[in-house]
Amino acid sequence: MMRKREMLRALLLMLVCISGLSACKKNVGTPEDNAVSDESQEEETPDEEDTYVFGFSGIDMENPYFITLESAIREVIEKEGYELITKDPASSPEDQEAQIKEMIEEGMDAVFLCPVDWEAITPALDALKEADVKIINVDTQVKEMDYVDAYIGSNNVEAGYICGEDLIGRCPEGGKVAILECPTQNSINDRITGFEEAIASAEKGFEVVERVDTNGEFEKALGAAKEILEKYPDVTAVMCGNDQLAVAAKTAVNLAGLKNVIIYGVDGSPDIKKELKKSDGQIAGTAAQSPINIGKTAARTGISMLKDEEYETEIYEDVFMIDKDNVEMYGVDGWQ
């Protein structure tokens, strides 16, 4: 009897030990064996927010307009915690295409693009689409707009038109006109188109006696303006595709010692606004746009695009004339 009790006691003790070992089982084996372990691991892994890398390819980063445009984009992108990498093609279509391919290899999510040549950029656009990189076309349009995901710029036809209207008001008798343009940049094409539409409506005729492709470069514009003024010293006005070209025209007019030539630009740059403050300056006005507003709008559009939020596919900022009468309103130390 005693022996049976001892055997029963030993059996109960073994059962208790086995139960305790089972309750203290360590998490080993497959995830199915250790579901609790997976849950704790998920809790320990923090949720990481998406981070985006943007590229910026302007036309020429020595041009104050594109410097300001890039700075405005960068301000918004970096404030949101994202990265912006800038490349400078320096007015070279070939360099721009090569740099865009570099951006693709570097894993850009989206690119802010101002094409050096609105037609030659097409192969680069095709490469971006193939790599699923979003394209935010800024300031000057590409020719094949079907490639781009959004466009943000100014109403460039209107910019040229208001310059033409101003010239008609100053010279109701008409006169000879020279044009400094850049056919590879559609923004400048639109400005010149708007200008010519305006002067064509004048009661007294304006004759375009010379037009020169400057490639958008100051030195080429300066040389072209010198030749034009030597050939036509009686020219009434010079319409320039942007303010940088207008500064070149103004320099040539000063070197020629001419006093009555009227010069128009487009941009509203600080340099041109300083010229407008001079009582004897030849700059009549500039159709102003805001690279700050364009840049910030483009940046917000790009962010919304990557976050799958709603965004507008086309945005046109207003333009307006700045002349000697209202230049004080806009200041001369920065862009409006």
Image (tube, helix red, strand yellow):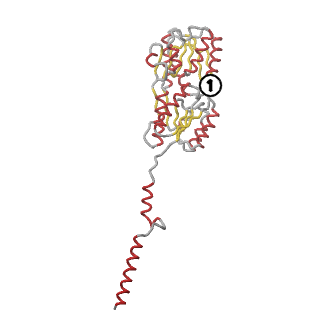
Determine the residue positioned at 45% across, 13% down: 325
Left or right: 213 in relation to 335: right
Left or right: 89 in relation to 162: right
Q: Nearer the viewer, residue 32 or 221?
A: 32
Q: Nearer the viewer, residue 110 or 310?
A: 110
- Give the vertical position of 53 relative to 233 (above or below): below
- Give the vertical position of 15 relative to 244 (above or below): below
Q: Residue 245: horizontal and vertical position, in percent?
A: 58, 20
Q: Quadrant of the N terminus?
A: bottom left
Q: Residue 318: horizontal and vertical position, in percent?
A: 45, 25
User: Quadrant of the rendered structure where residue 26 is?
Assistant: bottom left
User: Quadrant of the rendered structure where residue 249 is?
Assistant: top right
Q: Nearer the viewer, residue 21 or 274?
A: 21
Q: Residue 136: horizontal and vertical position, in percent?
A: 51, 36
Q: Residue furthest bottom?
A: 1
Q: Tag 1, which secondary structure? A: loop
Q: Nearer the viewer, residue 98 or 211?
A: 98
Determine the residue positioned at 58% across, 38% down: 125
Q: Residue furthest front?
A: 2
Question: Can see residue 146?
Answer: no
Question: Can see residue 251?
Answer: yes
- Give the vertical position of 18 relative to 8 (above or below): above
**Residue for badge 1:** 215
Determine the residue positioned at 50% across, 42% down: 52
Dot 1: within a 10 Å radius of its alpha carbon, few (fewer than 14), some, or many (20 or more) residues? many
How many callouts does the rendering have?
Answer: 1
Amino acid found under the numbered disc labelled 1: Asn
Q: Residue 58: horizontal and vertical position, in percent?
A: 57, 31
